[in-house]
Each structure stands twice: as C-alpha cells, then as structure tokens.
Amino acid sequence: MEKYGYRFSFGPWNIHEGADPFGPAVRPSRSFADKLAVYKELGFDAVQFHDDDAVPHLDDLTPAQIQAEAAAWRQTLADNGLTAEFVAPRLWEHPLTIDGAFTANDANARQYALDRARKAADIARELGTNLMVLWLAREGTYLREAKDAVWATQQLVEAINMLLAYDSELRIVIEPKPNEPMDQAYIPTMGHGLALGMQTDDPSRVGVLMESAHAVLAGLDPSDEIAFALAFGKLWSVHLNDQNGLKYDQDRSFGAIDLRRAFNQVRVLDENRYWEIGMVGLDVKALRTQPADMATKHLRNSLHTFLRLVERSRSLDRTAVADLITARDYEELDWLILNHLLGS
Ligand code: GLO
Ligand code: MG
C-alpha cells in the first residue's frame, strides 16, 4: 500500500461496543491486546492513548505503580511495530469533574484535574511520546450563568502553564469542540485553541488538533480550520472523520458524508507537506449496526479514503486550476473539480 510518507493512528476507543445514550452495548468488548493486532493488519503506525487506556484505574495507584505499568507498554508497542502518538488525560468521567475539570467551580475538582493531568504527562514520558492532547470535554457550561467565563479561560491558561512547567519536554495540543458533552464549550474552534496557547508561558510548546466533526459542529469548514492552524505552524495532529450536519457527534468514517469536504482537507494537508509534521489520526466509530467481526471496517475505509484522496489531490491539473482562477471562471473550476473527483 502506497502511504505517501503518511503515518496513521487511532485510539482503542475507535473499536468500541456500540452503546449509545438510548441503548446498551451491541458488541462484546475486545481486549487492548486484541485491538493491537488490528493496527498493523490495517496499515496503522501508532496508538493514541487516554491515560487510563495505558494504566487502568490510575486514580487508585501510586506514582511508582503508574510508572511501572506505563513502562511495560513501551515494550508491547515495540513488539507490535507501533509507537504512541499521544496521551490524553481523561478528565470527563470522574464524579469530581461532572461540572468541569480545570474550570470547575469546586476547588477539589480543579485540584483533581491538575493531579490527573500530571499523571498523564508521566505516562506519556514512559510511552515514549512528548505529546499530550487536551480534549476539554467538560470545560464549558450547561447553564451560562453557572460559571464565570473570563475566570474559566484564565484557569485553562494556568492549567497549561502548570503542565508546561511540570515537564519541560511536554508539547500540548488542544482539541477544540463546540459542544457535547457540554451545551457550550469554552474552546470551540482552532482560533480559540491557538489564542489560548499564545497566552501561555511557552507558546512554542502549545499547538492544536483539528477534528473534522468538531469543525462541522461549529459551522466551520474543516479544511479552513486545518489551513488556519497550519498558517501558524500549529497543526500538530488531526482527528479526521465526518459528520452529517448539526446533530450529535457522529465520528463517521472519513469522507463518508461529504467526499468533497474530505478531499479539501486532504488537499490542504498534502499541499502543506503535513506528512512531515504530524500523524493522520482517524477518530471514527463503527455504526451501531455492525457486528463485532465487521466493526473495524470504518478504520479501513477511512485510511483508504484518505490515501485515495491524496492521489486525487496530486493528480489534479494545477495549471488548469490556476488558469481558471486567473480567468475567474469559478463555475468551470467547480466542474473541473467535480469531474476530477468523479474520475473523468
Ligand atoms: C470526542 C473527542 C474524543 C477525543 C479523545 C482524545 O468528541 O473527539 O474522541 O479525541 O478523547 O482526547
Ligand atoms: Mg477527537
């Protein structure tokens, strides 16, 4: 398989049991060891981790125990020909973080979040990556009057400063999302993520991760969100997937809803040599209808769609495109792109 120098990753949560808010699991759980085999089988290179994917029940363990469990992973990954792309502190499941983590009104909750994030940084170091993803799941409100948004934003800056000081090698990427689980999140777009990073003590170590579905939920075009972050040299990871309009976060296979939108994401990444910058993460979920033995096809589909779109981007007649731009014949340009995507 020609991968054009790209490296691909996904997280263990992308092979899941299919539960939704209205119904239980429809597929049995697969062990992490079992999932690891899928990575190589499908042509993936790296694993994305939540802190507790690597070290389950880390809240109940001592720092030494956490370190030992995480260290064992490095060998397991190497044995499977894989690396760790990043570690993300899972700050949205503990009872203390019901109403927020770094921005909770409750000081105990904020303390828990800071401690937990430090543990995630320790785990990242043991796994051999210096990248941490902050998906700020519950940093926002269900009720606007319940929190002070100015103060909350400053709390986020302070939390990042704490992490930057805690580990001088650590690089942090913020994964913006406008809603879900919260009604309104504090960091909904690339612009918010970048601004937050610029305000920290070491902006050179803070970047962003663009997720396609999150951009669509914010009413934005994912390829423009990618471009904006690239223009600042800050796009250090992506979660490519797809989303059918303004509804719950769907994590559909990349390109499954809007192939042209997917093409433009790949085109912008490829024109800017993203393969030299970061990995192509695919944050996709199998449809609930899939039985267990068919519940990895969404990963296969997403990776191959990406690669086929790289081919489409590279084979685009750039001279013809440039001529049509000069002539300002955008209808003809539209037709050229459509024909190219339709294969003629
Ligand atoms: C949910 C997010 C989630 C994060 C993952 C890594 O909407 O996309 O899947 O990417 O937890 O932090
Ligand atoms: Mg994501």
Image (cartoon, helix red, strand yellow):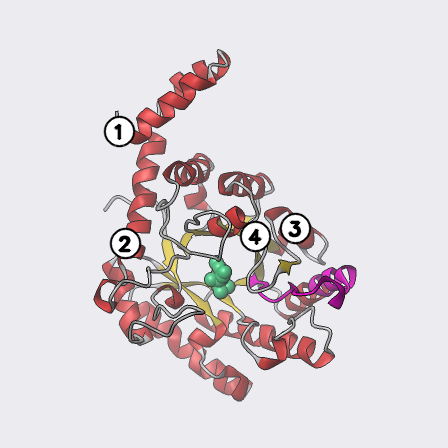
Q: What percent of the width, then of the height, locates residue 109?
A: 67, 78
Q: Quadrant of residue 167?
A: bottom right
Query: Which label's residue is closer to the chain start, 3 or 4?
Result: 3
**Residue lying at 39% horizontally and 17% vertically, measured from the top left:** 320
- In terms of sequence position, does the residue under pointer 1 or pointer 2 come before the other? 2
Residue nearer the viewer, 161 or 339: 339
The kind of residue tagged 1 is Gly
Q: Residue at x 45, y 79 (%)?
A: 55
Q: Which residue is mark 3?
A: 192
- Determine contact: label 3, label 4, CB under 8 Å: no
As for residue 123 lying within the magenta part, the answer is no
SS at mark 2 in the image: helix
Q: Amino acid at mark 2?
A: Arg
Numbered range of the magenta stretch: 134-157
**Disc 4: CA contacts within 10 A as few (<14), some (14-19) or many (>=20):** many
State how far apart marks 3 and 4 are (Cα): 10 Å
Q: Residue 343 got which mark?
A: 1
Task: Say above or below: 84 vs 305.
Answer: below
Q: Which residue is mark 2?
A: 300
* Image depth: mark 3 or mark 4 in front: 3
Separation (CA) of disc 4 from disc 2: 25 Å
Question: What's the CA distance linking mark 1 and mark 2?
Answer: 21 Å
Residue at numbered disc 4: 208
CA gap between label 3 and label 1 equals 38 Å
Q: Secondary structure at mark 3?
A: helix
Pick the front one: 174 or 7: 174
Asked whether 137 falls inside the magenta stretch, the response is: yes
Q: What separation in Å lies between label 3 and label 2 (alpha carbons)?
A: 32 Å
